[in-house]
Image (cartoon, rainbow, N blue to C red):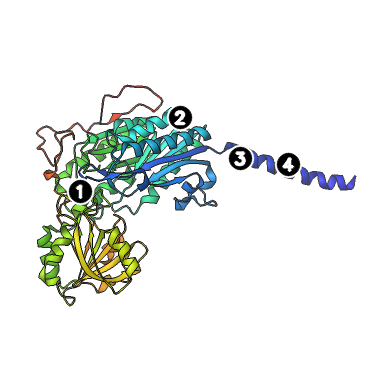
């Protein structure tokens, strides 16, 4: 009997602990994760197919978020049921077949693992699909058919995404990056998830109010970087506006400039439970955005390519960076326009190996890449590169040079004093050290991008953006827009001030026909 009384409290404690743990496990919210992310230039001849997407499924989805490691606080707050998160580098419009395939796979996965208390919708927001307006709005509407209208949905986006009425209607919580370049990418995704968890854990339902304000502004990211004014101060206003208890989140979308679609323009959205606080925050941001529209300018000095090269050659600051901005693959350009490289190789200054040193990063040339791997470093090589996708401005370019190094996905070919990084795909390559290059000891570095990413920005001693041709031409007025809403700044003079009053969007579980198509 003595043994019995010693064991019984232990067994009772163990039973109680197990019961509590099971109860906690059962009480954790069930949250799905899904999304398709890319940005697509409709001014590029490129098409994006399914094989271009990196597709993460199930538990592998969680591995893509640094804040979601198994022992993290965020991970432990829910039962995670990831569906599919697909992403690809910016490019041309996604084929309808690729889109439908990814959507069907997403819906099938969601169907198998329901029901759900919440869904984290992880998107970029500027995907174009052949024959379909507003793919992200379409995707979320179709997801709603599976998960139901009561499930709480929290969306995170790139600030260069587009928020249509349909997308805003079907999400409950929404936010976007507050930095360009996007150094707050994971901070934003975590905020979107924590906003969702906070509502579910506190027994709160959908936010009482969602204010949406379309703003007739369409500008490239290279004019709206938060490194400089006025975007720096504009985005700095957001944290204070989210401090009142009645406001959950506030966000400003610059929008995506290189797609000819009605939804492409600036947007402000604020979510919360206090109508007046939500309204004031939204209208504050919208009016401030509109009032500084004429102050937006390029984040760096700009010139023609020839003018940019002349400045670089005359400069004593090295490395001197030149952005080949019109064919920026990180914004949707094809990344294989040869026009700029052709101009460089025609210059007499670079004909001798003792000329000014220049790195060109980069140009796709899978045939040359494969040949180089076969014949090895130090050998002479002749092969065509580029213009397989976008040959509108220059044809494939014949390179005659020497193989200086061979990497996993790229090789370096020296032509005179120019070192050309030739890749086996269209992704820009700036992994200089991996290819044996010494950028800090190089006179000029030409990169296929707009504003410089942080590591290159910190490396530069001087920098200019060259206005070059391509699928993301920075001269928006030269592009043949037919479907964007008008009037639109900077294309038109607004003789009448736009209506920047908050539009309150019904909750996702309230059926109200949309009076806005953008």
Q: Which residue is mark 2?
A: 146
Picture residue at 13% right of the left edge, 42% below the top: 490
Task: Kindly state the secondary structure of the residue where label 1 is placed.
Answer: loop
Q: Earlier in the sequence, mark 4 or mark 1?
A: 4
| Residue 191 visible, this orientation | yes
The circle on residue 472 is 1
Q: Earlier in the sequence, mark 3 or mark 2?
A: 3
Of the two numbered discs 4 and 2 in the rendering, the one whose residue sits closer to the viewer: 2
Task: Kindly state the secondary structure of the residue where label 3 is placed.
Answer: helix
Q: Tell me how far mark 1 sits from mark 2, CA to CA.
A: 36 Å
Q: Which residue is mark 3?
A: 24
Report which quarter residue 480 is drawn in: top left
Residue 121 horizontal/vertical position (percent) = 40, 39
Q: Earlier in the sequence, mark 1 or mark 2?
A: 2
> In the picture shown, does residue 178 fall above or below 148?
below
Q: Earlier in the sequence, mark 3 or mark 1?
A: 3
* Marks 1 & 2, CB-CB < 8 Å contact: no
Residue 368 horizontal/vertical position (percent) = 28, 62
Q: Which residue is mark 4?
A: 15
Q: Tell me how far mark 3 sits from mark 1, CA to CA.
A: 51 Å
Q: Tell me how far mark 4 sits from mark 1, CA to CA.
A: 64 Å
């Amino acid at each position: 009997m003595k043994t019995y009384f010693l064991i019984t409290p232990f067994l009772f404690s163990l039973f109680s602990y197990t019961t509590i743990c099971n109860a906690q496990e059962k009480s954790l919210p069930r949250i799905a994760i899904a999304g398709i992310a890319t940005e697509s230039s409709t001014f590029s001849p490129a098409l994006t197919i399914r094989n271009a997407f990196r597709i993460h499924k199930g538990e592998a989805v969680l591995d893509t978020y640094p804040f979601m490691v198994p022992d993290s606080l965020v991970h432990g707050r829910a039962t995670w049921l990831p569906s599919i998160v697909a992403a690809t580098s910016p490019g041309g419009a996604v084929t309808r077949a690729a889109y439908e395939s990814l959507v069907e796979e997403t819906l099938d996965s969601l169907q198998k693992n329901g029901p759900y208390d919440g869904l984290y919708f992880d998107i970029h927001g500027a995907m174009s699909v052949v024959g379909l307006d507003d793919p992200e709005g379409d995707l979320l509407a179709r997801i709603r058919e599976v998960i139901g209208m009561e499930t709480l949905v929290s969306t995170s986006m790139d600030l260069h995404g587009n928020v249509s009425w349909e997308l805003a209607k079907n999400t409950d919580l929404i936010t976007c990056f507050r930095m360009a370049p996007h150094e707050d990418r994971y901070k934003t995704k975590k905020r979107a998830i924590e906003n969702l968890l906070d509502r579910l854990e506190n027994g709160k339902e959908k936010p009482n109010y969602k204010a949406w304000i379309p703003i007739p502004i369409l500008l490239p990211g290279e004019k709206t970087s938060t490194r400089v004014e006025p975007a720096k101060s504009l985005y700095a206003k957001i944290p204070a506006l989210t401090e009142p208890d009645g406001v959950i989140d506030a966000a400003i979308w610059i929008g995506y400039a290189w797609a000819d679609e009605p939804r492409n323009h600036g947007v402000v959205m604020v979510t919360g439970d206090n109508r007046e606080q939500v309204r004031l925050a939204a209208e504050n941001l919208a009016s401030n955005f509109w009032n500084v529209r004429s102050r937006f300018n390029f984040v760096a000095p700009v010139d023609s390519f020839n003018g940019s090269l002349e400045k670089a050659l005359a400069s004593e600051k090295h490395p001197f960076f030149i952005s080949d901005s019109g064919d920026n693959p990180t914004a949707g350009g094809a990344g294989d326009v040869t026009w700029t490289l052709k101009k460089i190789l025609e210059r007499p200054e670079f004909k001798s190996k003792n000329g000014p040193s220049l790195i060109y990063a980069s140009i796709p040339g899978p045939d040359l890449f494969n040949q180089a791997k076969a014949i090895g470093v130090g050998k002479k090589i002749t092969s065509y590169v580029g213009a397989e996708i976008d040959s509108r401005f220059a044809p494939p370019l014949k390179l005659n040079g020497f193989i200086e190094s061979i990497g996993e996905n790229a090789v370096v070919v020296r032509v005179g004093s120019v070192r050309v990084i030739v890749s086996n795909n269209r992704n820009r390559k700036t992994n200089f050290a991996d290819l044996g290059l010494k950028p800090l000891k190089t006179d000029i570095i030409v990169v296929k991008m707009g504003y410089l990413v942080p590591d290159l920005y910190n490396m530069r001693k001087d920098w200019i953006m060259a206005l070059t041709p391509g699928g993301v031409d920075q001269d928006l007025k030269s592009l043949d827009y037919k479907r964007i809403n008008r009037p639109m700044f900077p294309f038109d003079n607004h003789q009448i001030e736009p209506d920047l009053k908050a539009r309150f969007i019904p909750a996702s579980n309230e059926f109200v026909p949309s009076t806005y198509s953008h």
